[in-house]
Amino acid sequence: GEPQTATDYYNLALPIWRQIGNRSGEALALNDIGRAYADLGQPQKALEYSEQALPIWRETGIRRGEAMTLNNMGRDYSDLKDPDKALGFDSQALPIWREVEDRRGEALALMTIGWAYSARKEDEKALASELAALSLAKAAGDPEVQGGIETSLMNGFRTQHLPEEAIFFGIDAVNSYQQIRKNISGMAKDVQAGFAQSKSNTYRVLAELLVETGQLGEAEEILDLLKEQELK
């Protein structure tokens, strides 16, 4: 959905949860407001809400909520270009996801740990973390998380000037997203267009890599996949 609209709804829900004394509902609303601000490109604002949610999750003993918010804070610090703090929060989330046996959450934590290592120029650690994340995402059967990790690997290999490896993971990422687009093909057109737009950078970076390596026809095919949505 639209992050601004989501923020409005969650802000309406928050005082209601507080009024009826539902602490877990309050924490979830705070967490979701934070995520919506992150999606709007305001990680500092997102952190303000996550910092309110985290002690409530701990107070109520809801470990999944705690891990989710810790992970979100790690992402926000990554967006704020503070990989050391990001790594600190992501590293707290990881053992909790393992404790509650949530492979998707574990994959997300490993992916964001990989981002932090990459920002710290620890490329081998970043690669190991993201490959482990990819294996878990595949086991969890979550193509969106899988596509996100494959996109991260594509960008990482591109930064290291390894175009063949970057293209390999870029193609996998596009295939993951195409699977989702097929699954939502019966949904409203604005939902389909919104999803395609949110993932369009993956398609464009892959197309650029293909052009750079002289694969113009393949690049055009990738961009045509985006145009398919625009023509619908």
Image: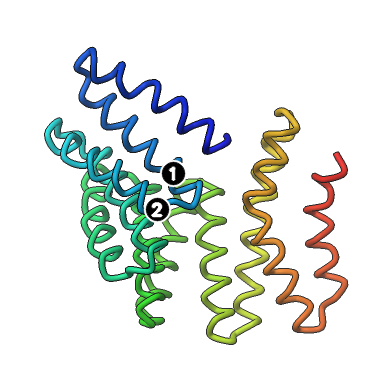
Residue depicted at x 67% and y 37%: 183
| Outermost residue toward the top in this view | 20
Residue 217 occupies which quadrant of the picture? bottom right
Please tell me the numbered disc located at residue 131: none
Of the two numbered discs 1 and 2 on the same chain, state the one appearing first in sequence. Answer: 1
The residue beneath circle 2 is 43
> Is 222 on the left-hand or right-hand side of 89?
right
Residue 146, image x, y percentages: 52, 55
Asked which secondary structure carries label 2, the reply is helix
The residue beneath circle 1 is 37
Residue type marked 2: Pro
Asked which secondary structure carries label 1, the reply is helix
Assess disc 1: are there few (<14), some (14-19) or many (≥20) residues with their C-alpha within 10 Å of its C-alpha: many
Please say if the residues under marks 1 and 2 sit with CB atoms less than 8 Å apart: yes
Q: Distance between the residues labelled 1 and 2?
A: 7 Å
Residue depicted at x 57% and y 34%: 1
